[in-house]
Amino acid sequence: MKILGISCGRKMSNTEILVKEALMGAQEMGAEVELIRLHDLHIKPCTGCNACVVNLFEKSGPGDCILKDDDFAFIDEKIMECDGLILGSPIYEKSPSGLLKVLNDRMGPSHDVAFRMIAKKIRNEKGITTGRGPDERAFKPRAASLIAVGGSEWDNLALPMLHLFALPLQIEVVDKILVNWVGLPASIVFKEEALQRAHQSGKHVAKTVMNPIADAEYIGESGVCPMCHSKLIEIRNEEHNFPAICGTCGVRGTLQVINNKVKFEIAEEDKAHSHVLLSGKFEHADELMKVSLKPNPNIQELPERLKKYKNYLDYSKPPRS
């Protein structure tokens, strides 16, 4: 049982301390633990070239990224290898560290478990037995705890964006921890309750992966969305057939205020649309194939239409010595 900790914060400061405390809890349960600090890695930003998706579906490959000469392969291997994840980040401008977003983008659709299942099915249907297909380790059940640390209550996007890292990987999020009013470096060591909470969280992740994932229990704050426990709900306008949608898992529903408490209600038949479920991911993949990845009927006109923009303006760049 391997539990991986990923800290998106400074060395020996609040986020790292909480992630280490959680790993100590996991280690108490017999887990082999490891810590990665994103600041120690060089991860190039995704260019959106879709080469990984082409490799996965059209070439029946593993969906490898074509960007090389950085540390993505290193952390990708560590994530595939682990059974549980402790993911922590400081909160900058209501969000996690931008380093996490860069990594999240690089994981991309090629790492989405539903996409990898579809690619595996295509290989089987074609009878392809040579070459590497999707990494089989991607399909094993895993659990995660998410930890966000901020100096105030400007935190609205922190936990939802941390959850978006686990969502495509189909990692069961069994805990979310939000710690506010911790602005000074390493001052978390004076918040004993937060340390104990992180320790408990690490133990819970380890305990979860030791049992069938169907028995997983979420121990964090319940949030508003009953599917992913997010508090982030987007209000839609009259043009849509539904008034509200979860900003994290995408499930659709309605909002009500009962006794001054907001309730997000989801019809039973709509739960399958949530992206925490494989059914929601398969639906998303089907939409992509039928809409955004469907070639325009006038595709032959593309070179001519691009001429208007190709030579318009030169890029402004900083001077180089």
Image: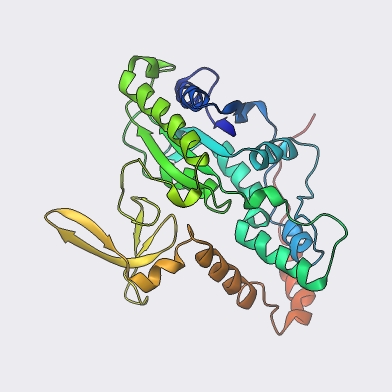
Report whether 116 appears left or right of 231. right
Looking at the image, which residue is at 31% across and 70% down?
Answer: 243
Report whether 234 appears left or right of 7. left
Q: Is residue 182 visible?
A: no
Work out whether residue 76 or residue 295 is closer to the camera in this orientation and state it. 76
Q: Is residue 174 above or below residue 109?
A: above
* Residue at the limit of the structure toward the front, as seen here: 211
Image quadrant holding the N terminus, namely top right
Which corner quadrant of the image does residue 43 belong to? top right
Residue 117 lies, in percent from the top left, at 66, 62
Looking at the image, which residue is at 85% across and 62% down?
Answer: 129
How many numbered dots are placed on residues in this image? 0
Looking at the image, which residue is at 57% across and 68% down?
Answer: 282
Which corner quadrant of the image does residue 238 belong to? bottom left
Residue 34 lies, in percent from the top left, at 61, 26
Q: Is residue 215 visible?
A: yes
Residue 234 lies, in percent from the top left, at 36, 60
Report whether 38 appears left or right of 185. right
Report whether 136 appears left or right of 254. right
Looking at the image, which residue is at 67% across and 66% down?
Answer: 118
